[in-house]
Image (spheres, rainbow, N blue to C red):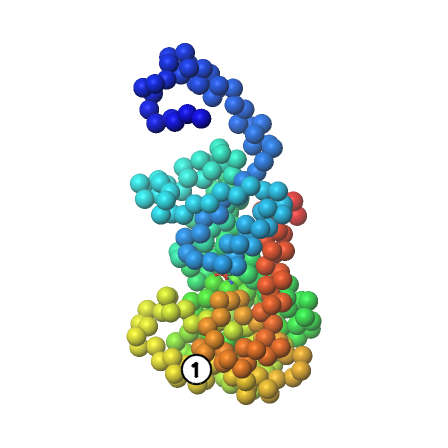
Amino acid sequence: MKHLLDFQNIQKKEMENLIEEILKVDLYKLNQIKSFTLLQFNENSTRTRLSFAIAAKRLGIDIVESTDNISAKSKGEGLMHELETYESMGIETVVIRSSENNIEDYKNYKEVAIISGGFGNSSHPTQALVDAATLMKLGKFNYDIPVTYVGDLKHSRVFSSGRELLNKLGFKVGVFTNEELIPENTDGLNIFNSWDEVIENSGSLELLRVQKERIENLSSFNFEKYKKHFQLSDEVLSQTPPDFAVFHPMPINIGIEIDEIAAKNEKFKYGEQLKFAIPARIISYRYALGNI
Ligand code: CP
């Protein structure tokens, strides 16, 4: 083995040989053999990151990882040059998680396929696919309102993509939360004002975490008041029909959106959603690569 730190101890002939060998590498041929996916997670994630990584491995796609912190973005590089670089290296898909709401920036570029792993509060389509598959499997598409979202709708990308997908499929979407956490655009939503209304009119509910990291005036947010009205308690859950289901995209904050006893109830079906984490990402890769 040899260090490559400078050229001091390398002979002229050896250097010429290195350059000639570089010219012989057929990048086009290499890129035909293996495709790469770049996982670019600029916010924390457990389920989305791992399931995309495992899905890629199952499909025989090689994984590379980066974040904005360690990329050349901070040196002023534009998106076009970034994407051209990826393409030249055989990267076909990029999975991005970002705090920004800038999916539109990517739509004009064709160099690589971009898959949202969660952007700001606006986009998390693969979680919406996980949730829709779960709703379909558990028979919730037999209801006019298959699911009512309860909790922090305003800051939730899970909700944004979920409502978009369900509305597109022809379903109404229920919502139940306080005034502070309702989104500005309420088109296609059925706003409920009590747990009774939720239970009577929807096949299931999906709890959403209160996103402390995105609430502007967190110090003035009244958690006790929120819990009193919108925490799913064992008492409320006991009033639901036997086939009622409660979902959660996770991570779950027990003691805020759900109480400890309700969290152990068999109607709490987050495990069913988890079963679709990898299948949804496998299908997302196949869609992005033009194989579906
Ligand atoms: N549901 C979801 O997006 O979870 P992660 O943040 O762990 O990826």
Residue pointed to by mark 1: 227
Q: Nearer the viewer, residue 84 or 7?
A: 7
Q: Is residue 172 visible in the rendered structure shown here?
A: no
Left or right of 255 on screen, residue 128: right
* Total numbered circles: 1
Q: Disc 1 on helix, strand or loop?
A: helix
Q: Quadrant of residue 4?
A: top left
Q: Residue at x 63, y 67 (%)?
A: 272
Q: Quadrant of residue 126?
A: bottom right
Quarter of the image where the N terminus is located: top left
Q: Quadrant of residue 241?
A: bottom right
Left or right of 159 on screen, residue 284: right
Residue 125: where, in percent of width, then height? 54, 58
**Image vertical order of residue 190 relative to residue 13, above or below:** below
Residue 152: where, in percent of width, then height? 44, 72
**Image vertical order of residue 71 relative to residue 10, above or below:** below
Q: Residue at x 66, y 75 (%)?
A: 143
